[in-house]
Image (spheres, helix red, strand yellow):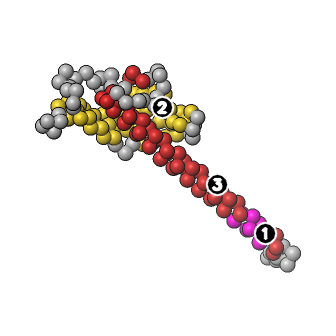
Amino acid sequence: MNTITLSEIPERNNMKTKIKTKWKSLFVVCSIFIILYIGFYVWILSSVKQTVTSIYLYKANRGPVSNVSEDIRDEFLKFQTYPNRGPDDRIHIELSTGKVFHTFLYGTVWIKYTYEGIDTNTNEVKYGFSKVPIKIKVKLDNWEWKLVEKDEEP
């Protein structure tokens, strides 16, 4: 039969306290990591959506394009040559919620987008396409997410 002396009891309590402290520390570190990961997830997704929207509106309205690598700037809208496009057509762009995988400095975003040209007189869709899957790779450059690679199905 094992007997415990009074001198051993503080050692067991001390070990239990150390184990609890390790688990608490691990929990805090994991919680901080998850919060940071989700924060970057939202930041990347919103930045990419804003940039993609401005790119498609740029092609339609000749506005400025930002945060896009020179290598892929001409890859956007390369499938769009519409003979029935009018100069006064309204452009409608819709993006899906999207998914992101990132390593805090680089990331990949998967979204689907719909691009429609709407006749201003009849409000009917004249041309466009819907739910086109697109994969965009980004990198953090001067605290802005820059699009560096794009893969799109026609």
Sequence order check, earlier mark of 3 and 1? 1
What's the CA distance linking mark 2 and mark 3?
32 Å
Q: Residues within 10 Å of mark 2 (few under 14, many from 20)?
A: many
Q: Position of residue 111 (x, y in %)?
A: 37, 38
Mark seen at residue 85: none
List the residue tagged with mark 2: 67
18 inside magenta stretch:
yes
Which sits in the foreground, 29 or 119?
A: 119
* Relative horizontal placement of residue 117, taking residue 112 as reference (left or right): left
Write the residue at 71% across / 63% down.
Answer: 21
Q: How many marks?
A: 3
Is residue 95 positioned above or below 151 on the image? below
What's the CA distance linking mark 3 and mark 1?
22 Å
Q: Position of residue 79 (x, y in %)?
A: 29, 23
Write the residue at 30% across / 33% down.
Answer: 132
Q: Position of residue 51 (x, y in %)?
A: 42, 35
Mark seen at residue 14: 1
Write the residue at 79% across / 69% down.
Answer: 14
Q: Quick check: can you spot residue 124?
A: no
